[in-house]
Structures are given as structure tokens and as C-alpha cells.
Image (spheres, rainbow, N blue to C red):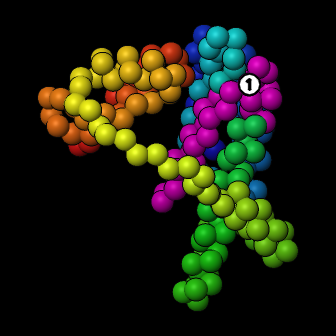
Amino acid sequence: MKFNIRGENLEVTQPISSYVEKKVSKLERYFETPLTSDVYVNLGVYNDEQVIEVTIPMPNLLLRAEERHDDLYAAIDLVVDKLERQIRKYKTKVNRKSRQNGSPKHVFAGMEQDALEAQLQEEEDDEGLEIVRTKSFDLKPMDSEEAVLQMDMLGHSFYVFTNAISGDTNVVYRRRDGRYGLIEPS
């Protein structure tokens, strides 16, 4: 792995860099051959909150995780845990497909079958999404500024509306940095 570590509102010191490399390098145990891809790590401090983003582009797979915490080292640990869950989830999907197709897939290093089944069951429990409430409402034609005002009045973090100019359904949302975003169909 080749690490590209950069900091925003934070100086990346040698101990921080070493800790990130040590923790993220542990992900290599999930692969048969050592990873040759770059690892992009963005560290930052925003409003007394430590933020870490890790992106590992690989052929046919993009691993990406972001974590926020008061302690930078705890955030690093949490983001590595997230990446491990993503790898295990992807690995179980690959193993299922290879068993169904009858062809072995040698992307990931071998894990014990019992541990794999336990992780699979845990992930399936996490994936049990249940819709507990459904709302319906009329989409009023308006511009994005009015939609932001409506969203703020309701106290929501997003607002769906019909764009008065284009006639398309759009969404405005409040970003983590306190500013607003607009989602338009392409």
C-alpha cells in the first residue's frame, strides 16, 4: 500500500502518520496478495471534531469510510473497523457467487468457515431494514431558496420540492458544515 495522508486544519505529524499506516495496513490480511493500490487518507479538524476519511480504490471495488470523533486516534480505529466490515461484506458476496457459479474466487485470503458464517449472520442482522412510517405530501412548485426556508421552518435536514423553473423534483439538504446542498436529476 502506498499512503497519501493529508491534513486539513491539522498538521500530520510522524506519530499520526505511523498510527494510520499501522492500522490501515492490517487490512492486508483480508487479501491473498499485498495491495498495490494507493490509500488516500484525509484528516481534519472541524468544530473541535476530528474527521478521518479513508479511500482505497481497487479494481472492481472502492473501499471508502469516514468517521468523526473527539479523539483522532479513536476516529482512526473506528474507520478501520468500518473498512473491515465492508471487506467482510464484499467477501461474503463474492464467496456466495463463486459457490453458486462453481468457480473459485481467489481475491481474498481464506477465513475459517465458522467465523465467516458468524460474520455473515451478523451482517444480515444489520441489513434488516424496516420501513416504520410512510408519508405522502403534495410537491409545491418553488425555487431552491424557498425550499431551504421551508426546510428550516419544519426543522428537517432535507426537503423535497418541485423546481418551479424546470418542473423537476429536487431535494435541498443541510450539509454537516452548516451550508446547504441541492440534488437535481440529470
Q: Which element type, helix, strand or loop, lies under badge 1?
A: strand
Q: Which of 112 and 173 is in front in this view?
A: 173
Question: Where, quadrant-wise, is the N terminus in this rendering?
Answer: top right
Left or right of residue 118, residue 134 in this image: left
Residue 78 position within the rendered picture, expressed as x and y whole percent measured from the top left? 75, 37
The image shows residue 100, relative to residue 54, as above or below, that is below
Q: Give the residues in magenta.
A: 52-77
Crowding around mark 1 (Cα neighbors within 10 Å: few <14, some 14 to 19, many 20+) is: some
Left or right relative to 147: residue 17? right
> What residue occupies the far bottom of the structure in this picture?
102
3 vs 149: above or below: below
For the point 72% across and 16% down, which residue is it?
13
**Amino acid type of disc 1?**
His
Residue 74: in magenta span: yes
Tell me: residue 180, above or below residue 112: above
Percent x, y for residue 87? Answer: 66, 56
Q: Name the residue under label 1.
A: 69
Residue name at image x 67 percent, y 32 percent:
67
Query: In this view of the protein, which residue sits in the foreground, 53 or 122?
Result: 122
Asked if one can make out residue 5 in the rendered structure from this viewpoint, the answer is: no
- Place residue 104 in its image quadrant: bottom right
* Screen quadrant of the C terminus: top left
